[in-house]
Amino acid sequence: MAYDEARRAATAAARRTLGLNELDAKALIFVAQNPGARPSHVRDHLGITSAGVTTLIDRLVQRGAVRRDLDNEDRRVNHITATVDLECPPWSALRAYDDAVEAAIETMDPAEADAVAAALDRLTAAGTASG
């Protein structure tokens, strides 16, 4: 629970600094990890409506965080690409907590990291099964 709360707090602070709401931040991270994603992919990832994803992408385009590119073969199709680098400040704040945790994991003995991952998998499965 402490990990989850610390991660939420770090992510919320990053979003406040960047002036993004939670869905916009999640969408931006998804698009950065999936360059050229279609709006329907973003919609499905976030579980929102078509109108909702259109409005969300409009906000990110207006901020200069993403761009829409028309498909060369089907002009009705858009592809969304991040125009900001999530590896560089200030945008790197969105992933700073996760990046620090990943770096700490890399310093662990591989057997220890595997044991921790297995324990987290079991705990996640137990929590998922409860609902």
Image (cartoon, grey):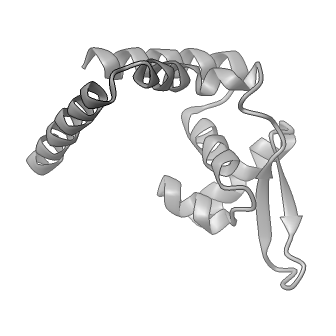
Q: Quadrant of the N terminus?
A: top left
Quick check: 76 above or below 112? below
Q: Residue at x 85, y 42 (%)?
A: 62
- Horizontal side of 88 relative to 8 (left or right) equals right
Q: Residue at x 78, y 34 (%)?
A: 85
- Furthest residue toward bottom: 73
Where is residue 94, by image quadrant? top right
- Horizontal side of 52 relative to 87 (left or right) equals left
Where is residue 51, by image quadrant? bottom right
Quick check: 46 above or below 8? below
Q: How many marks?
A: 0
- Measured as percent of width and height from the top left, residue 16 is found at 63, 18
- Horizontal side of 127 relative to 113 (left or right) equals left
Q: Residue at x 67, y 50 (%)?
A: 31
- Measured as percent of width and height from the top left, residue 60 is found at 76, 43
- Measured as percent of width and height from the top left, residue 65 is found at 80, 39
- Horizontal side of 64 relative to 13 (left or right) equals right
Quick check: 89 above or below 78? above
Q: Residue at x 61, y 19 (%)?
A: 14
Where is residue 35, by image quadrant? bottom right
Foreground of the two, 58 or 112: 112
- Measured as percent of width and height from the top left, residue 37 is found at 69, 62
